[in-house]
Amino acid sequence: MSYPENYRYTKEHEWASLDGAIATIGITDHAQKELGDIVYVDLPSEGKTFAVGDSFGSVESVKAVSDVYAPLAGTVVEANTSVVDSPQLVNDDAHGAGWLIKLELSDPSQFAGLMSAAEYEEYIAAEH
């Protein structure tokens, strides 16, 4: 798996892409593989505000329930209802159609502080 170069990543296995002040957030392909078949996704409602590191929802697989953490601070402008209705989208396309939320960032400069694709790949290689 090669990770999208224009995304940024966290040690908790979330990814973020940035479009102006709006960040799209999801879990990485590595995370969905570790979880296995995802059966349920719990996401916040629009208008909720999160600080960096806050749990904003959870992803449940046949193996475990995992909290998902906000890699950036901001307010939810959209939650992906498609993954709530069809959780397997996260397994099928973790970096695309399986995105979780969109945040309007309070400080878009935080994006630069997350790991690059190369740094994330080194991080997961070191974990194993």
Image (cartoon, rainbow, N blue to C red):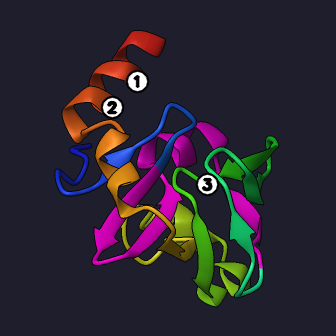
- The kind of secondary structure element at disc 1 is helix
Residue occupying image coordinates x 33% and y 36%: 115
The label shown at residue 120 is: 2
Answer whether residue 35 is magenta in the image: yes
Q: Position of residue 124 (x, y in %)?
A: 40, 23
Label 2 sits on what residue type? Tyr
Task: Check residue 70 in the rendering and tell me which mark sits there, or answer none.
Answer: 3
Return the residue nearer the eye: 65 or 51.
Answer: 51
Judge whether 28 appears above or below 24 on screen.
above
The magenta-colored residue range is 15-44
Q: Nearer the viewer, residue 32 or 8?
A: 8
Indicate the amino acid at tag 3.
Ala
How many marks do you count on the picture?
Answer: 3
* Residue 124 visible somewhere in the drawing: yes
Q: Quadrant of residue 50?
A: bottom right
Q: Residues within 10 Å of mark 2 (few under 14, many from 20)?
A: many
Callout 1: 10 Å neighbours few (<14), some, many (20+)? few
Find numbered disc 2 in the image and state the secondary structure of the residue it sits on. Answer: helix
Position of residue 33 in the picture relative to residue 36 (left or right): left
Distance of label 1 from label 3 (alpha carbons): 19 Å
Instruction: Mark 1 and mark 2 in contact? Answer it, CB < 8 Å.
Output: yes
